[in-house]
Image (spheres, grey):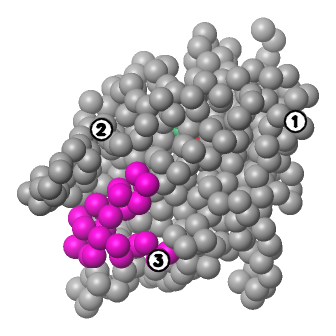
Amino acid sequence: MGEIDQAFVQEQEHRPKLSIIEAQGIPEIDLSPLFHHQVPNPSAIDALVKEIGSACKEWGFFQVTNHGVSLSLRHKLEEASRLFFDLSLEEKKKVARDAINPTGYYDTEHTKNVRDWKEVFDFLSKDPTLIPVTSDEHDDQVTQWTNQSPQSPPNFRTIIEDYIEEIEKLAFKLLELIALSLGVEAKRFEGFFKNQTSFIRFNHYPPCPYPHLALGVGRHKDSGALTVLAQDEVGGLEVKRKSDQEWVLVKPIPDAYIINVGDIIQVWSNDAYESVEHRAMVKKEKERFSIPFFFNPGHDAEIKPLEELINEENPSKYKAYKWGKFLVNRINSNFKKQDGENLQIYHYKLP
Ligand SMILES: O=C(O)CCC(=O)C(=O)O
Ligand SMILES: [Fe+2]
């Protein structure tokens, strides 16, 4: 077995406990009122909005069932992901990411300067996606990111594109419910998603001989608006429970989606909702797959607390920032080991 490469070793305080607390408390929300009614049912929608609002406030995480995404399509996607990661490293590296275009395959991501025990394939929702060239706020140059197409499995690209179309519909619906729960118009956020920079990520966590030392993904918060995650039956995602700061496991529910509030919703809501820390454990015997969809606004979206939500008693807690600049800064820092901490929304906090 040999010794673990030190790059993967978490500091003592961040190592996972292998005795696990199951987060029974994470809300499970049935979205069928959105889909299974010939005539709209306002009281069922109101109840749903309330449920979503309290889940965002108390957990920052929830699971949804009856979400309207085709299960056969999801299963096709999961199967294609397994086939892709089964390819030889040489084959996968043919679609490797590089410093210029960060889409495609890579196996060297670091989270908080510790290497993650995983390999990844990233695919943009919009091809091409417009993005600033640098994170310098005085630099107006824009470039394009494009997707890479693996040769195998056949139709991988088409399957991903079909899936993205569906998952995006779900993401927009969730965003409407979240807007309503904050007391603003359902479509309040829609405009920000013109030229969206969303992407889907395929995560593969191989079995790890050192599950007590390493993590599949180290603790982090998602920096976009909303994440819609499909996890398999193995489980390993842990969330830092707001009530007591304990790490709790998110129970796999077959075919459900795990939704979490990202940093942008935290800022839009002026901290009413919080982007919560999470991480993924690995296992000695089992590999695990997960597929998050990171729902992100356009690069030129200016992110700041919604004006409707701020007033004298509740003043704005953040200064505005440009999403594209934030994203580019993060992408550059995730690509290799950094000297210091990467950019976080609290850097924009007002005193
Ligand atoms: O694999 C998981 O369950 C979580 C992955 C995650 O948090 C991420 O990719 O941002
Ligand atoms: Fe995450």
> Residue 169: x percent and y percent?
43, 54
Closer to the chain start, of discs 1 and 2, is 2
Q: What span is in magenta?
A: 169-192
User: Callout 1 environment at 10 Å: few (<14), some (14 to 19), or many (20+)?
Assistant: some
**Residue indicated by mark 1:** 93
**As shown in the figure, which amino acid type bears the numbered disc 2?**
Asn
Closer to the chain start, of discs 3 and 2, is 2
**Observer-nearest of 143 and 9:** 143
Q: Which type of secondary structure does the marked residue at label 2 adopt? A: loop
Given this view, does label 1 or label 2 mark the residue nearer the observer? Answer: 2
Report the side of 132 relative to 174 (left or right).
right
Report the side of 124 relative to 49 (left or right).
right
**As shown in the figure, which amino acid type bears the numbered disc 3?**
Gly
Please tell me in which quadrant of the rendered image residue 120 appears.
Answer: top right
Q: Which type of secondary structure does the marked residue at label 1 adopt? A: helix
Give the position of the N terminus as an image quadrant. Answer: top right
**Observer-nearest of 84 and 267:** 84
Identify which residue is drawn at 77% across, 58% down.
146
Whether 189 is among the magenta residues is yes
* Residue at mark 1 to residue at mark 2: CA–CA distance: 37 Å
Query: Does residue 54 sit above or below 26 in this rendering?
Result: below
Closer to the chain start, of discs 3 and 1, is 1
Would residue 345 be visible to someone looking at this image? yes
Please say if the residues under marks 3 and 1 sit with CB atoms less than 8 Å apart.
no
**As shown in the figure, which amino acid type bears the numbered disc 1?**
Lys
Q: Residue furthest left?
A: 43
Q: How many marks?
A: 3
> Residue 38: x percent and y percent?
17, 51
**Observer-nearest of 25 and 338:** 25
